[in-house]
């Protein structure tokens, strides 16, 4: 029962972008975990850029680096996400 949460800077997505993201993530998760698409859930959580360091970077990156399979190439003091 894989669950994926994607936190991102606040922005608006089109229906096509939402469908593309769901399809791509679901395809990858089902292939890697060897499970059916019906077992995958996906949450997309907007975070205001001014809250990013406290709500995302510190608790998920700084305080739990052992869980990261891909580390970011930024630090909050270096300018954050670098785009939308």
Image (tube, rainbow, N blue to C red):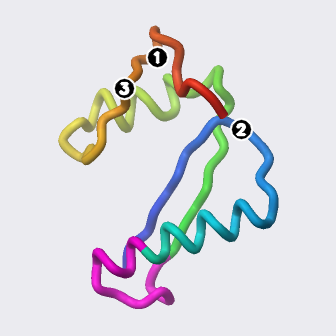
Q: Residue at x 53, y 14 (%)?
A: 79
How far from the left and from the top, in percent, is residue 3? 43, 69
List the residue tagged with mark 2. Answer: 10
The answer to if 35 sits in the magenta stretch is yes
Disc 1 secondary structure class: helix
Instruction: Give yes or no for contact between labels 3 and 1 (Cβ–Cβ under 8 Å).
Output: no
Spatial CA distance of label 3 from label 1 is 10 Å
Q: Distance between the residues labelled 3 and 2?
A: 20 Å
Q: Is mark 2 on a helix, strand or loop?
A: loop
Q: Position of residue 66 (x, y in %)?
A: 18, 41
Kindly check if marks 1 and 2 are in contact, taking CB atoms under 8 A apart as contact: no
Q: Residues within 10 Å of mark 2 (few under 14, many from 20)?
A: few
Q: Residue 39 in the image: state x and y as whole percent.
A: 44, 85
Q: Residue at x 80, y 65 (%)?
A: 15
Q: Mark 3 points at which residue?
A: 73
Q: Which of 80 and 27 is in front in this view?
A: 27
């Amino acid at each position: 029962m894989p669950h994926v949460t994607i936190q991102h800077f606040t922005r608006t997505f089109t229906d096509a972008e939402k469908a593309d993201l769901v399809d791509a993530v679901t395809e990858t998760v089902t292939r890697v975990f060897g499970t059916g698409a019906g077992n995958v859930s996906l949450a997309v959580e907007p975070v205001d850029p001014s809250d990013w360091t406290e709500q995302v970077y510190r608790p998920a990156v700084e305080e739990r680096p052992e869980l990261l399979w891909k580390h970011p190439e930024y630090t909050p003091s270096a300018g954050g996400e670098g785009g939308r």
